[in-house]
Image (cartoon, rainbow, N blue to C red):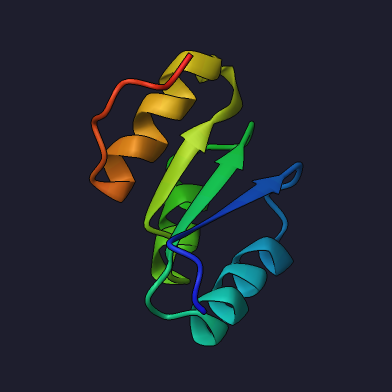
Amino acid sequence: MTPDLILVDFATSAPYAAELCARIRQASPASRLVVFTAFADAETRVRYEQAGATACLLKDIGFRRLVDELRALLGSHDAPEE
């Protein structure tokens, strides 16, 4: 079974992070690959996207917005159950 979404937390903008994205994409081409990072300069974001990332989200977006973004990527806009 293939995961619908893979969330990768990078604490670096090192080139090997983009290589990891490429390897994940190769292993799971149908999954949405989301990079969660504090490093989001334009060059780094382009590297992640070229390596197969579906989205690149900044760590300062807050929990609620993170959940909303992930739900949107999955196509689910349902309210969370409480």
Hey, which residue is sitting farthest front in the picture?
82
Whole-percent x and y of residue 12? 74, 46
Q: Residue at x 40, y 22 (%)?
A: 80
71 or 38, nearer to the observer: 71
Residue 53 in which image quadrant: bottom left
Q: Residue at x 39, y 49 (%)?
A: 55
Q: Is residue 2 above or below residue 63?
A: below
In the image, 57: left or right of 79? right
Hey, which residue is sitting farthest bottom in the picture?
26
Q: Is residue 27 above or below residue 16?
A: below
Residue 68 in which image quadrant: top left
53 or 70, nearer to the observer: 70
Whole-percent x and y of residue 20? 66, 71
Whole-percent x and y of residue 5? 47, 57
Q: Residue at x 48, y 13 (%)?
A: 82
Q: Residue at x 48, y 61 (%)?
A: 47
Whole-percent x and y of residue 64? 47, 15
37 or 46, nearer to the observer: 37
